[in-house]
Amino acid sequence: MKELDPHAIRPCLACGGTDAHLESMLPPGRRQEVWRVVCACGQTLQQWSVTQGAAIRAWNRNLALETDNLSPSRDGSGRQGSKS
Ligand SMILES: [Zn+2]
């Protein structure tokens, strides 16, 4: 069994800070805590995960998606040069 490596959490997309951390809460009517990653700047996910590992993965994946969206070169409007 491997311990969770906090360094697996990627730096925040909004502020670039590396102090994003796991946060837990107990939803009403549930016995199990849920987790998400939140940054000091307020950047976080809308979605809670049932495990810390899943929360980290969701955070990292979310950053990848947002980076993709923010990249103008991936916009594709006016350019049709992408073929596979
Ligand atoms: Zn941040």
Image: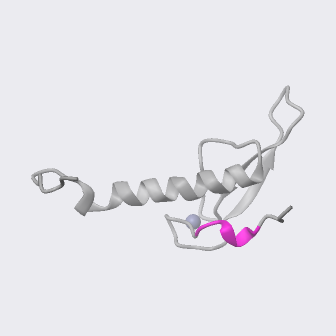
Point out the stretch of residues depicted in magenta: 5-10
Image-based side of 10 in relation to 32, left or right = left
Residue at 68%, 42% (x, y): give it: 48
Q: Quadrant of ligand 1?
A: bottom right
Residue at 74%, 58% (x, y): give it: 22
| Residue 9 at x, y percent in the picture | 65, 66
Q: Is residue 32 above or below residue 67?
A: above
Q: Nearer the viewer, residue 74 or 28?
A: 74
| Residue 53 at x, y percent in the picture | 73, 54
Q: Farthest residue to the top: give it.
A: 29
Q: Which part of the image, by quadrant, shows the N terminus?
A: bottom right
The quadrant in which residue 39 appears is: bottom right
| Residue 4 at x, y percent in the picture | 79, 64
| Residue 59 at x, y percent in the picture | 60, 55
Residue at 76%, 42% (x, y): give it: 50
Q: Is residue 9 magenta?
A: yes
Image-based side of 38 in relation to 32, left or right = left
Q: Farthest residue to the right: give it.
A: 31
| Residue 69 at least partly seen | yes
